[in-house]
Every structure is written in structure tokens, then in C-alpha cells.
Image (tube, rainbow, N blue to C red):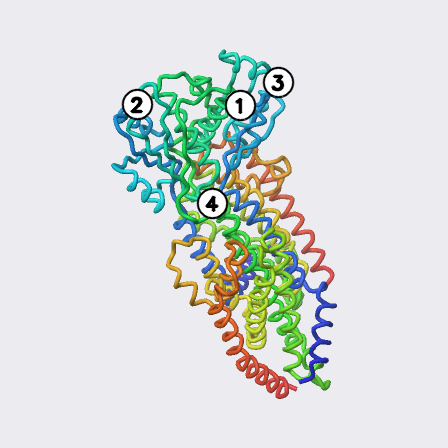
Amino acid sequence: MNLKRAWRIAARDLRMGPRSPIFLYAVFLPIVMSFLISAVFGGLLDPEPTLGITDLGSSQLTVAARGLEGIAVSLVDDAAELMGKVKNHDLDAGLVISDSFDAVLRSGGSPDLDFYISGESLASNRIILAVTTSELITEVAQAEPPIDVSVVAIGDESYVPIGDRLLPIVVFYAVVIAALFLPASSILDEREKHTLDAVLVTPTNIYEVLLGKGILGVFMGLVMGVVSLLFNQSMGERPFAVMLFLLVGSIMMAEMGLILGSLVKDANSLYTAIKGAGIFIALPVIFIIWPTLPQWIPKLAPTYYFLQPVYDIAINGATVTDFWLELGVAVAICLVLLPILAAVGRRSETRLAWAG
Amino acid sequence: MNFGVISAIFRKDLIVFSRDRFYVFITIIGLVAFVAMYWLLPDSVDETIHLGVVQTGMDTLFDGLGAGDQGLEIVEFDTVDQLRGAVEDGTDGIVAGMAFPEDFLDPGTKPTVDLFVTAALPAEYEKAMEGLASQLGFLVSGTEPPIDLATHTVVLGIDRVGNQVSLQEQMRPLLAFFVLMVETMALASLISTEVQLRTVTAVLVTPARTRDFIAAKALMGTILALTEVLILMTLIRGFVGDVPVLLLALVLGALMVTGVGLLAGSSGRDFIGVMLMALAIMIPLMIPAFGALFPGTAATWIKVLPTYGLVQAIVGVTTRAASWSDLSGDLAMLAAWCLVLLGLGTVVLRRRVATL
């Protein structure tokens, strides 16, 4: 095997990449997915209560509200606009604060205040917003509450927002499209257009072609995995550990992609195979999103052995040493796939020779 | 137009479609997956905060707090240890616990209430629970809070507490759109193959004219899309409310995606190229369906997208009991977009066929 020739094939495919829709798909899909998942689905499944404030003076209540954690506070210029937004459920609740609010409140009077609730807001959000607002008013009034509250934190499990739990979907798409789909469609395309025949007439053999396409797949899988994590600001404190698992995962996916691309008859079959096997290789993603499901099931999928470590290292602060076993299994899968890939490559070369 | 010829081309296309393993597979799997997804989604909205309490002598107060659809359910415990365990384990959905000391009702004391929260509790809940304990303190001690927010509260719009639109119901337009999208790709691929392989020129040697060819394709696309979306809507209990309005919207939706299919297919690209082109057109059209998942009014630019009327009709009829008069504007816009896209698709395909 001549590594220089394999490298040349990888470089050629990289140069020609932007002409291929699949290549562009591999580059842009993780970014689009990141946007959809973190912005759209993160907000959908884990929405923050929203509070609009029209402050006709410059109340301390507004300042205190804007410092709240977990409540999205926005300022609205006039009361009519605020009421419209609340009515249309653009906001869960709206607060109109009169210009003399703070002065009247501190003098022990009852200042003007309107609190609007959207009819479509959840009852739980209404309680959160009403109680929190009352608490802030007590603070601004500098009133002494009749009780003290002592907060006792239980357990050490920290809150993982749904946006973070959906992160494996982004990583999954980034690595699978770039490392599996790209080499698979590339080798299939060369077979369909018979450019592979032309390449094999030269001193380059099928193993060098597969290695070249594999190198590009691994490179793209790794880069897109890192890019998607950076895009979501989720590389964590151990970026090299994350990259190690992304690298092993990309190698595994690239090997699978090359085997698939060498075996399938046409693009339809390739899509059918990927769609058909999709639910199997995507299993770990589903089980990370719903951690209460039985956790032995995703271990049946090869993608578990890099997706779970990437997630736990990037989001939960785990280390490589926590995942030695998973790393070993992932490397073993890569090693088992190698002779299969070699056999498929040999078969492919023989077929082309016969066809020629 | 020759209806016999159109019928013959239509039958031929139906056979070609039924032999295409990929689209048959995707159509069946898609339907099964979308229906399964619908039934797996929550069919109700849990808008209640479950709060554990240990208290003595305040039964009446807590019975009143947990009564009705107020969004708060009080679960009482005998001991602090039981409460602590329930909060830690999340028993009965309990998110926090309050332990009121036995001297809480004693006059002249400033008691301390222990608030138990897990580290996983979102920040807004913790602040709200602190506030709730404080407000209870005001209530029990007989001290007036600076402002009684309840007397300043106005609910705007239809009050949906206890009758919220479930995620299942919100997902209906998106699922319908996914089904229509798959059929757009199927039609685009069918046309593209005819253009690529130039079989259309063979068809045009017969008495069939270009308009017959295009009409047959449009008929094929519309019937395929409509059949599948009708099956889906039946299986996801979509036919509620004003069914004729819903049927009209679905027919218009099927016609519209047929126009997109004609446009994408006339490019005559290969399978992957057509898939990506159809996706590129359909992704912006998905935005209104995603938007329907979120509360509030859609931005103006979303309202002018072709699929906005379709989504509004599905959401309006199935969740808000909307009628003809409520949806006439949306349906008119949808019909206009159908004409534009079908017209554009027809013109582009006609020109493409003429160049062959």
C-alpha cells in the first residue's frame, strides 16, 4: 500500500468537495441542526416563563426583574403593546409599573400596578411569575418578611438543560453525515460513473482508494464534530478527550461508510440502507435525551461507544478514565471492521476487473 | 388535453413508483414513524407544580392552596425525612418541599422555613418556591404584603388553564408537512429520472403532448400526497372540528407540494441532487409548521410563506375550532400560492422538456 497515493486521493476529493451536494450537506447540516435543536427544540421542550415590563418611571423592580435567572424578561415601550403581546401569548405575563411606584411603595402606600396574565400561559408559569413578582416587590419595598427561608439543596445531580441533552443529535449528524455518508456516496459515485475503473488502471489499487476516501471521511467527521460542539459552546473542559472519542467514532463511521458504499447497488439502495439502519445507529441519542429509559439498550449500537463518552465528557465533566472500557470497545469495533472492509474492497476490485 | 393519455401515463407512473424500493420504503416507514411519534407524544399538558409540605395546624390553608386548577398541588408528609426523600427521588413529580416548623403559627416569632430543592431544579422554580414560602408567611402572620398581586391581576385572552393544547396536537401540522415533503421528493425523483433518461421524449413520440405529460405528473403527485396525508390525519385523529375546511386545506397543500415537486424534478439531476434540491425548497416551507409549536404570533415574514395558510388551517380547525370565516384569508393565500407554485413548476418543466 502506497500512503502517498492514498493521501493524493484524499486531497483530490477534498479539492473537488465543494462541487458535491453531499459535501455541502455534510458541512451545513450540523450548523442547521445546531440552530434547530438548540434554538427551536431547546426552547420548545424547556421553555422559560416570559415576563414583559412597561416601566413608566425607572423602578428598582425592573432592575431586580432583569437580574432573575430562569425567567426571560423583556422591556416593552407602552402598556397597550404589552397587553397585545400578553393577549397573543408572545409573553406569559406583563407588568405595568407606574412612574411613582418605588416612592409610593417605600412610603407604605399602595402604588398603581397592573399585572396581566396571558390566557394561554401555563398555570405553573403563572404561579412562578406571580410569586416571583410579589417577592421582588417585597424586596423593593424593603419590607421585612415575617419568616426566614433556608434553602437546603439535596443531591449532587446538576440540572442539564434539554438543549444540552439534545447535543448528541447534532454530534451524531455531524459525524455520521461527514464520516459515513460522505465516503459511502463518494465511492458509490465513482463506481456509478466508472471513474473508479479509470483510477484502478493506474498503479493505484482499491485499498489506496478506500484509504484515501476514509482519510477524508475521518477528517471531515472530526472537524464537523468539533465545529458542531464549538457552535453549541459545548466542548467542555477536556477538549482533547472529546476529540479522541470523535476521532475513534469518525474512523468507525468511515469504515462503515466505505463498506456500505462498496456493497450497495445504487444511490437509492444507499439511502434505503442508511434510513433503515438509521434508527439502530441513532439509539444512543434517544437514550441520552430520555435517561430514565433502560440504559443497556443503547449499548447494542456501535455509536454508543463514542457518543456517550463525548456527551458525558463535554457536558457532565467526565474524564477519559471513566470511559476506558467504551474506548476499548470502540477501537475493537474499528479493528473488526478492517478485515471486512478489506474483503469488500477485494470483491469490488474483482468485480470491476470482470466487468472490464 | 387527452384524458386517456393522462390516465395511461398516470398508471405507468404508479407502477414505476410502486417498484421504487426507496420511496415505497420511505413512504411506509415514514407513515409508521410519524404515527408512532404522534402517539408517543404527551396528549396532555402538565401545568402543575407539585410541592411537598410538612406542617402542623395549617390544613385549611394548604387545602385552599392546592384546590382547583391553580397550578399547585400540595402533597403532605408526616416527617421532614419523608419529605426530603420524596424531593430527592422526585416522588409524584414533587419538585420542592417546604418544612414548616411547629412554632410557625406562634405569634411574635420569626420562624425559619426549610425549603428543600434538588440541584437539578431550574432556577425560576427555586426563586418561586422561596417567594411562595415568604407569601405564606405574610398570609399566616396576618401581616399585609406590600402589594397583594392577586387584586391587580387581569387574564387577557381565552383562559386555557386546564385545557392547554398538547404537544401531540401541536405536532399535527408538522407531521402532515413531513408526509407531504416525502411525496414531493418522490414526484421530483420520478420527473427527474424521466428528464435524465430522456424517456419523456419517447412518451412525446406517442399522441401524448407535453401538457398531458405534465398534467399526469401533477395528478400523480397530488393524489400520492393527498392519499398519504389523509391516511396520516386519520391515524392521528386529525379529523376533528370543521372537516370540510380541513379537507380543502389538505387538497391545497397537496397541490402546492406537487408544484414544488415539478420544480425540483425539472432540474433533471441525479437522485442525490434532486433530494437536496427538494430539501432546499422544502426547508423554508417547514418554518410555519415549526412556528406553530411555539406560543405567540408569527413574524410577518413567516406569514407570507406559502405553507403558513396550510398550518393555520390545520391548527385552527383541530385545536381552536376555527371555521370558514376565521380561516378564509389563510385559505385564500394558500390557494394563491398553489397557483403560483403549480404555474411555476409547469412552466419550468415545460421549458425543460422542450430543450430535450
* Lower position in the chain sequence, tag 1 or tag 3: 3
Q: Position of residue B142 (x, y in %)?
A: 35, 17
Q: Nearer the viewer, mark 3 or mark 2?
A: 2
The amino acid type, in three-letter code, at marker 1 is Leu
The crowd level at tag 1 (other Cα within 10 Å; few <14, some 14-19, many 20+) is many
Residue A95's label in the rendered image is 1
Give the left or right position of residue A77, taking residue B118 as reference. right
**Do residues under tags 4 and 3 come within 8 Å of each other at their CB atoms?**
no
Quadrant of the image occupied by residue B52? top left
The amino acid type, in three-letter code, at marker 3 is Gly
Residue at 31% from the left image edge and 40% from the top image edge:
B83
Q: Nearer the viewer, mark 1 or mark 3?
A: 3
Give the left or right position of residue A5, taking residue A235 as reference. right
**Where is the C terminus of chain B found, in terms of image quarters?**
bottom right
**Residues under labels 2 and 4: Cα distance?**
49 Å
Q: Tell me the residue that label 2 is attached to.
A: B105
**Do residues under tags 2 and 4 come within 8 Å of each other at their CB atoms?**
no
Q: Position of residue A143 (x, y in %)?
A: 47, 19
**Residues under labels 3 and 2: Cα distance?**
39 Å
Mark 1, secondary structure of its residue:
strand
* Chain letter for the residue marked with disc 2 in the picture: B
Q: Nearer the viewer, mark 1 or mark 4?
A: 1
**Residues under labels 4 and 3: Cα distance?**
42 Å
Q: Is residue A153 above or below residue B159?
A: below
Q: Is residue B173 visible?
A: yes
The amino acid type, in three-letter code, at marker 2 is Leu
The amino acid type, in three-letter code, at marker 4 is Met
**Do residues under tags 1 and 2 come within 8 Å of each other at their CB atoms?**
no
Q: Tell me the residue that label 3 is attached to.
A: A57
Residue B171's label in the rendered image is 4
**Do residues under tags 3 and 2 come within 8 Å of each other at their CB atoms?**
no
* Lower position in the chain sequence, tag 2 or tag 4: 2
